[in-house]
Image: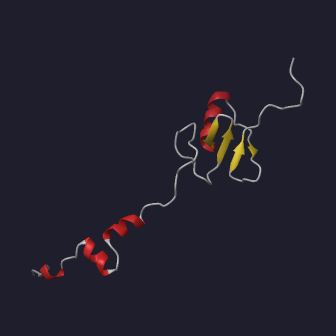
């Protein structure tokens, strides 16, 4: 039983967009992120951007994902690192530095 689909063709993308009161370019623009990635730190271990609210380690050599830092530390020293919470930020950790007592080592 053949059906005649010639009258029921789907309109092109541009025509659908115009019927809804916008252009096809607006549809493409809506999917792009408006978040600027300028100034975001790059992980020293995997060289990917460290997300703002991801667990991260602030080391003297740079910023790391917590997982990357722990994997590197465990591979080098054979134990998990002891990390301190950064002041006022619950998703950042810092590496404990050398104990400073105010006296120089002779």
Q: Is residue 72 left or right of residue 85?
A: left
The answer to which quarter of the image holds residue 64 is top right
Name the residue at the top extreme. 106
Q: Is residue 94 left or right of residue 3?
A: right
**Residue drawn at x 90%, y 26% as measured from the top left:** 103
Q: Position of residue 58 (x, y in %)?
A: 68, 42
**Quarter of the picture holding the N terminus:** bottom left
Q: Position of residue 67 (x, y in %)?
A: 61, 43
Q: Position of residue 82 (x, y in %)?
A: 74, 39
Task: From the viewer's side, name the closer residue of 83 and 63.
Answer: 63
- Determine whether 27 is above or below 103 in the image: below
- Determine whether 68 is above or below 17 in the image: above
- Determine whether 89 is above or below 48 in the image: below
**Residue drawn at x 68%, y 28% as measured from the top left:** 77
**Residue drawn at x 25%, y 76% as measured from the top left:** 15
**Residue drawn at x 87%, y 23% as measured from the top left:** 104
Colour approach in the figure: secondary structure
**Quarter of the picture holding the C terminus:** top right
Q: Position of residue 50 (x, y in %)?
A: 57, 47
The answer to which quarter of the image holds residue 17 is bottom left
Name the residue at the left extreme. 2
Q: How many marks?
A: 0
Task: From the viewer's side, name the closer residue of 15 and 45.
Answer: 15
Task: From the viewer's side, name the closer residue of 17 and 76.
Answer: 17
Task: From the viewer's side, name the closer residue of 2 and 57.
Answer: 57
- Determine whether 4 is above or below 73 in the image: below
């Amino acid at each position: 039983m053949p059906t005649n689909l010639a009258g029921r063709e789907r309109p092109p993308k541009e025509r659908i967009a115009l019927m809804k009161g916008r252009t096809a370019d607006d549809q493409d623009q809506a999917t792009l992120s408006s978040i600027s990635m300028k100034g975001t730190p790059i992980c020293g271990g995997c060289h990917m951007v460290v997300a703002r609210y991801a667990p991260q380690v602030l080391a003297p050599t740079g910023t790391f994902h917590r997982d990357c830092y722990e994997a590197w530390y465990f591979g080098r020293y054979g134990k998990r690192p002891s990390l301190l919470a950064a002041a006022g930020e619950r998703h950042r950790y810092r590496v404990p530095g050398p104990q400073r007592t105010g006296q120089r080592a002779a």
